[in-house]
Amino acid sequence: MITITPCTISDCGIVAQLWNAKRLDAASCWYEADAVDEAYVYQLLSAGVQISIASEASSHVGFGLWYGSAVVARLVALAADEDEVYYRLLSEFCDWGIVLGAQIGCAEIGTALTTERGRMDALGVVQIVPIGFEPLAPGQDPSDRVPKLLRAECDLQVLKDAVTQILEPAP
């Protein structure tokens, strides 16, 4: 059974280890991300970033980072090798945002077709819009802009319902 718990000061090393391991996964959005240490994770916690850790049995199997306000819950990142862990963390993010009073959840993502993007697309409810583009060459038609950065956005309750459908499909 997967459990999700808030990161404490004593868990910062665990999150750093999970982060650094995930950055070696070539199919992930984490691939070649900067390595971090326990102090960096502590700085995130101190800055008010919510960090949650997923565990199964006695192993730590993933984590998520998010922050927000009563308007928008912002998902910074989810790191999980298994689909179920990813979706459990995403469900935790939705619950956190709903309790906060936010109606919308969003994340900034790259354009690469990663494992995480495939999991998000499988939900079928997340809207993706380009928010950053490659620079235009002199004289290039602006309609030929190439997206570089995307915004993924969804109503938190709709997202929660879609995650629940994946985790607990109807018989």
Image (spheres, rainbow, N blue to C red):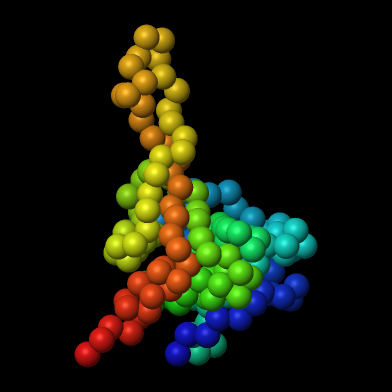
- The residue shown at (35%, 14%) is 140
Q: Position of residue 43 (x, y in %)?
A: 75, 58
Q: Nearer the viewer, residue 138 or 125?
A: 125
Among the 4 quarters of the image, the one containing residue 68:
bottom right
- The residue shown at (65%, 67%) is 50
Q: Position of residue 7 (x, y in %)?
A: 66, 74
Query: Is 163 above or below relative to 3?
Result: above
- The residue shown at (25%, 86%) is 170
Q: Nearer the viewer, residue 167 or 31?
A: 167
Among the 4 quarters of the image, the one containing residue 13:
bottom right
Among the 4 quarters of the image, the one containing residue 49:
bottom right
Query: Is 157 above or below relative to 72?
Result: below
Quarter the C terminus occupies: bottom left
- The residue shown at (32%, 78%) is 165
Q: Position of residue 56 (x, y in %)?
A: 49, 85
Quarter the N terminus occupies: bottom left
Q: Residue furthest top?
A: 139
